Image (spheres, grey):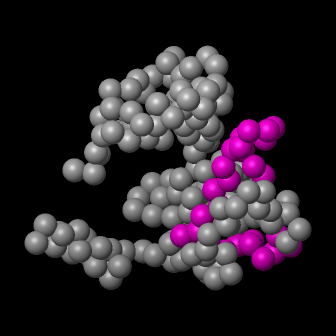
């Protein structure tokens, strides 16, 4: 019963709302929509930009994890010259998209993620600020529940040893945040 209002909003939105395709006047890119490409060093640079241009890509994961040794947090994976692409409900974390030529939907129900994320010295993923410093841990709720600081100033100055990491992980896993 508690989902009835949400269902009603969704149905009304589908029936009476303007679709993304109608709003932008572009077709869905079936080849790149509703797919997962989250493996390291994925690149579409060798694919002609015309496969992407002036289409809507929806529901795909392009996330690229930063790993030790990477020189860049943000990865430029799409073909040069890509224009008119609308990303709808995609995970674009750590991905560069030229937003002067393409659109990332950042609000509404089908918004995209386009955060900068990097492992810090506590071996945890942190969302970065514009200067690429840790701003907020990805596991914020778990840390709060375990009584662990979520403040960037408390990121260890030196990388945890394996023993420190194990103890930290045990502390985080000792709490239940599902209820």
Residue 115: percent from the left, percent from the top?
Answer: 58, 45
Residue 26: percent from the left, percent from the top?
Answer: 62, 77
Residue found at the very far front of the displayed protein = 163
Residue found at the very far left of the displayed protein = 1
Q: Main secondary structure of the magenta part?
A: loop
Residue at (56% x, 63% y) in the render:
90
> Where 42 sits versus 96, above or below?
below
The answer, for residue 24, to whether it is visible in the render is no
**Is 76 inside the magenta-drawn segment?**
yes
**Is 75 inside the magenta-drawn segment?**
yes
Residue 91: percent from the left, percent from the top?
Answer: 57, 58
Residue 120 location, quadrant: top right
Q: Nearer the viewer, residue 53 or 33?
A: 33
Residue 47 location, quadrant: bottom right
Residue at (28% x, 45% y) in the render:
176
Q: Is residue 128 left or right of residue 101?
A: left
Q: Is residue 51 left or right of residue 88?
A: right
The answer, for residue 104, to whether it is visible in the render is yes
Residue 81 location, quadrant: bottom right
Q: Is residue 140 left or right of residue 49?
A: left
> Where 9 sits versus 28, above or below?
above
Q: Is residue 112 left or right of residue 74?
A: left
Q: Nearer the viewer, residue 170 or 121?
A: 170
Residue at (85% x, 60% y) in the render:
80
Q: Nearer the viewer, residue 159 or 2?
A: 159
Where does the magenta region start and end? 48-77
Residue at (62% x, 69% y) in the render:
36
Q: Nearer the viewer, residue 51 or 17?
A: 51
Residue 62: percent from the left, percent from the top?
Answer: 65, 61
């Amino acid at each position: 019963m508690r989902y009835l209002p949400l269902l009603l909003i969704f149905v009304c939105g589908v029936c009476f709302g303007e679709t993304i395709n109608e709003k932008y006047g572009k077709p869905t890119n079936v080849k790149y929509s509703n797919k997962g490409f989250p493996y390291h060093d994925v690149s579409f640079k060798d694919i002609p930009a015309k496969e992407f241009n002036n289409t809507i890509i929806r529901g795909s994961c392009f996330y690229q994890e930063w790993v030790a040794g990477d020189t860049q947090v943000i990865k430029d994976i799409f073909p040069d010259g890509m224009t008119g692409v609308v990303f709808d409900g995609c995970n674009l974390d750590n991905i560069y998209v030229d937003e002067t030529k393409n659109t990332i939907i950042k609000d509404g129900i089908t918004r995209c993620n386009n955060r900068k994320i990097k492992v810090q010295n506590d071996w945890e993923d942190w969302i970065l600020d514009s200067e690429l410093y840790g701003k907020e841990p990805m596991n914020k709720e778990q840390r709060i529940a375990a009584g662990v600081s979520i403040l960037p100033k408390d990121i260890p100055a030196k990388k945890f040893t394996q023993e420190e990491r194990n103890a930290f992980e045990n502390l985080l896993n000792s709490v239940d945040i599902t209820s």
